[in-house]
Image (cartoon, rainbow, N blue to C red):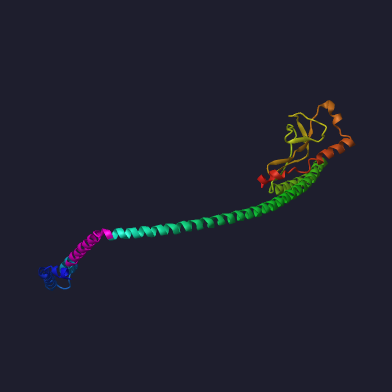
Amino acid sequence: MNDQRTINIPKFPFLIGDFTLVAITIMLILNMEKPLTPTVVLLSIVGFGLAALIGLVPYLLEFFALVKLNQIRTLAEGFKKLQQLDTVANTIHAATTQWLGVHDLAQQSLQAAKDVTEQITREAQAFRELIQKINDSEKNLLKLEVEKLHRAQADWVQVMIGIFDHIYALYKAAVRSGRPELIDQLTKFQSACRDLALRIGLVPVEADRGDLFDPNQHAPADPNVKPEIGTPILETIATGYIFQNRLIRPVIVKIQTPPEETQSQQLSPSEAQNAKWHLSEFTEPSIDNNKTDSNF
């Protein structure tokens, strides 16, 4: 308190300046014509503001001086405390002793944490084994369901192929009959059925007259005939089928033969039955369950 009383800034000069600015501003307002212009109002505001600021200056200076004095006092007290090295040394020694006790407690806590960690690890391992068993069971169940779906797919594809074979046989019979109306109706009917089958990925394939024989795409109607690659094709006996970009049955075709073999190509009843059997062995689609997954 004694230090604060010694800090006394003279306020008389500031008060004179304050009153002078206020008086000048008031005289300016009174001597101006009414109403006052914006410039006069702005000057009046500036004058009063400066007067207020001048009145606050001595008090602000006293405040800053007191703050500085308190800082100096705080530094002096801190310097005195730093000189008490013995007390600090004793405090450090006591803190070291306490730290050793804390270290022992920390070792005990660490050992307890290790025990808890080992227990959690064992429980986690048991839980992983349980989850693995559940996953294996679900995988086996899903594998069984997929196999069922594959078998069902093979069945309905086989049914579709049988239906299309009958439709193609009707179409060929209409062509042989030579009746344009019947041919046109069966052609449209066959095209509509093939468009529907295309939505599920089943595409019938035919070979045109004059196409060259390719063993990767064609098969002879007579299984005893081994045509050479590039032999001209006379006609399609039964359409081949592509299911989801895989050939599941080649096109059954009749191969063009030399004139001297034409008579030998006339099928006897037993040979016709043999050709029918050869066609039936291509009827069932060979859908590999292991390869079908990539097509769905």
Residue nearer the viewer, 263 or 97 = 97
Left or right placement of residue 85 versus residue 186 in this view: left
Q: Residue at x 82, y 38 (%)?
A: 278
Say if 83 sits above or below 295 in the image.
below
Left or right placement of residue 227 versus residue 131 in this view: right
Numbered range of the magenta stretch: 62-86
Left or right placement of residue 268 versus residue 139 in this view: right
Task: Tell me which corner region of the image, top left, top right, bottom left or bottom right, holds residue 6.
Answer: bottom left
Residue 221, given in percent of the width and then of the height, sits at: 81, 36
Task: Tell me which corner region of the image, top left, top right, bottom left or bottom right, holds residue 105.
Answer: bottom left
Is-magenta flag for residue 121? Answer: no
Instruction: Give the residue at the far right of this rendering.
Output: 269
Residue 3, given in percent of the width and then of the height, sits at: 16, 68
Left or right placement of residue 280 versus residue 212 in this view: right
- Residue 148 visible in rendering: yes
Is-magenta flag for residue 63? Answer: yes
Residue 89, given in percent of the width and then of the height, sits at: 30, 58
**Magenta-drawn stretch, dominant element (helix, strand or loop):** helix
Residue 291, given in percent of the width and then of the height, sits at: 69, 43
Q: Quadrant of the N terminus?
A: bottom left
Residue nearer the viewer, 275 or 261 = 275
Residue nearer the viewer, 200 or 88 = 88
Q: Residue at x 68, y 53 (%)?
A: 137
